[in-house]
Amino acid sequence: MAESSNLPTWLETLLSEKFYEACEIHHDARKNEKNIFCLDCCVGICPHCLTPHGSHRLLQIRRYVYHDVIRVGDAEKLMDCSYVQSYTTNSAKVVFLNPRLQTRACRNSSNTCISCRRALQDPYFFCSIFCKINHILRSEGMMSDYLYDCEVLTLPAEAGFDDGLMTPDSVLEPFVSLRTSSGSSASNGAAVGGVDCRTIISTATTEIVRKKRSSKSAVRAGGCVPVSSPPSESGNRRKGLPSRSPFL
């Protein structure tokens, strides 16, 4: 990063710290990943290290698509995060701390990150906090105008401290596949051959119910369901030896 010496120590350490690695102090403990950053001590800690940092400013680091992110609500208490692309996951809006590696150059993209050229959505200019800071330092040389004085920063308390692992939201909806003669699939509510799919589903269900009811009626009437009789044995019976009258 250009002119990193002009950054406050906590910010420079935050962007260079390796999170979600085992804590050296609590190496043998369960859930010992370093997913908290103490701004006062400028160090990454695990949940087992919280006791001596109880009165410090603590920032929870989350993990999204294998990269470190922080909630926009937390980031905006520390710095100006405008024009940094955010993502919504698990009902939380987050931003990446550092740029992600690109396996190939973006093509046919009208908007890219000013620093690393990653494809972005409009109207964003930066893919991560690192990229915005890097651009400001190159163009202005100082970050002081973009940093805020945050005296209190606590871990989320609405549902207790979580593990920080985030996954994209997913909604499961009922799926009905109706193949048309052309092989395409029609979803609920769509028309197939001019007929509403819901009508087809309703008709098929009615036919099944009618068959079940007719079977039950037969059981009640005769006490059992008619079974086809076994094939007659007369057709397959061999002829016995001819009987002869005794000689007189």
Image (tube, grey):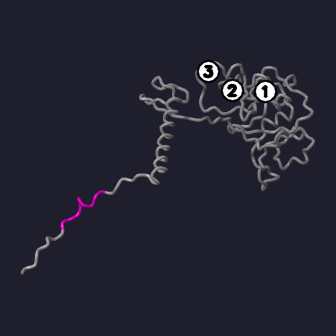
Q: Quadrant of the N terminus?
A: top right
Tag 2: amino acid: Cys
- Name the kind of residue labelled 1 in the image: Ile
Above or below, 17 against 130 in this view is below
- Which quarter of the picture shows residue 152? top right
Q: Position of residue 244 (x, y in %)?
A: 11, 74
User: Element at badge 3?
Assistant: loop
Residues in magenta, as a range: 231-239
Where does the image place residue 215, in percent across and percent down from the top left? 47, 46
Going from N to C along the chain, the mark reached first, 1 or 2, is: 2
* Image side of residue 70 versus residue 50, left or right: left
Marks 3 and 2, how far apart in space?
Answer: 14 Å
For residue 35, side relative to residue 225 (left or right) = right
Q: Is residue 154 magenta?
A: no
Q: Is residue 236 magenta?
A: yes
Is 189 on the left or on the right of 180, as rendered?
Answer: right
- Foreground: disc 1 or disc 3: 3
Residue 109 numbered mark, or none: 3
Q: Give percent across and percent down for residue 103.
A: 60, 33
Assess disc 3: are there few (<14), some (14-19) or many (≥20) residues with their C-alpha within 10 Å of its C-alpha. Answer: few
Residue under label 1: 133
Q: Which residue is at 49% across, 44% downward?
A: 212
Q: Secondary structure at mark 1?
A: helix
Q: Tags 1 and 2 in contact by the CB under 8 Å rule?
A: no
Q: Nearer the viewer, residue 206 or 199?
A: 206
**Looking at the picture, does residue 118 appear above or below residue 157?**
above
Which residue is farthest bottom?
A: 248
Q: CA distance from mark 1 to mark 2?
A: 12 Å
